Amino acid sequence: MRIHHDKHHAAYIDNLNKALSDFPDLNSQSIESLIKNLDTLPEKCKTAIRNHGGGHLNHTFFWNILTPNHGQKPEGELHVALIKTFGSLDDFYTQFETSGLTRFGSGWAWLVVNTQKGLEIVSTANQDNPLSEEKTPILGVDVWEHAYYLKYQNKRAEYLKQIWNVINYRQIEENFLKALS
Ligand code: MN3
């Protein structure tokens, strides 16, 4: 996690700042706004913002939905919505893990709120974020090899099973309510 944060995430930030240095007007926008409106960006910096800006946004989001307080469970409205959408918590975990497991190559698995205010599991390639598809992420798990290789080697499935132990459901409940409002 430390290497992931201090090296990988830092590199996305450095490269994003480099890409934005020629576009001072874009610097005043939030990273969420840039990623939401990728199509409107100048061709010269669009790909760099998509990749490195997406990397910065995704990782900032990721650190905030993790916690050292092990074993949290979803509660309140989020719990109700998860059961309503997926049938049971176990079914939700299984579908989410499958989404991360079947992402070929590098990418992310997400729990999102869609435009109908419903919950949905999606996955994105590389550093793409569901915001670019008008979906609001409330939980996201990095399935790039760099996220798990040092501890889990090639066993992405095992990493995805263990990640539930460190998920910060209080933050995800907050993300959920904000996405609904
Ligand atoms: Mn990563």
Image (tube, grey):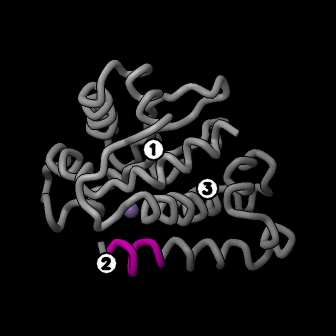
- Using the rendered view, name the quadrant where residue 102 is placed: top left
Question: What residue sits 43% from the left and 65% below the top?
Answer: 63
Q: Which mark is residue 50?
A: 3
The relative height of residue 164 versus residue 123 in the rendered view (above or below) is: below
The amino acid type, in three-letter code, at marker 2 is: Arg
Give the crowd class for mark 3: few <14, some 14-19, many >=20 residues within 10 Å: many
Closer to the camera: disc 2 or disc 3?
A: 2
**104 or 139: nearer the viewer:** 139
Instruction: Give the mark, 2 or 3, whose residue is nearer the N terminus.
Output: 2
Quickly name the residue at label 2. Answer: 2
Q: On the rendered image, what quadrant is the C terminus found in?
A: top right
The relative height of residue 65 versus residue 138 in the rendered view (above or below) is: below
Quickly name the residue at label 1. Answer: 125
Question: What residue sits 74% from the left and 62% below the top?
Answer: 44
Closer to the camera: disc 2 or disc 1?
A: 2
The amino acid type, in three-letter code, at marker 1 is: Ala
Give the crowd class for mark 2: few <14, some 14-19, many >=20 residues within 10 Å: few
Give the CA separation, mark 2 to mark 1.
Answer: 23 Å
- Residue 136, x across and y down, in percent: 60, 41
Instruction: Give the mark, 2 or 1, whose residue is nearer the N terminus.
Output: 2
The relative height of residue 97 versus residue 13 in the rendered view (above or below) is: above
43 displayed left or right of 18: right
Give the CA separation, mark 3 to mark 1.
Answer: 11 Å
Q: Does the closest atom of ligand 1 sit within 8 Å of the Cβ of label 2? A: no
Question: Which residues make up the magenta segment?
Answer: 3-10
Question: What residue sits 65% from the left and 23% below the top?
Answer: 116
The amino acid type, in three-letter code, at marker 3 is: Arg
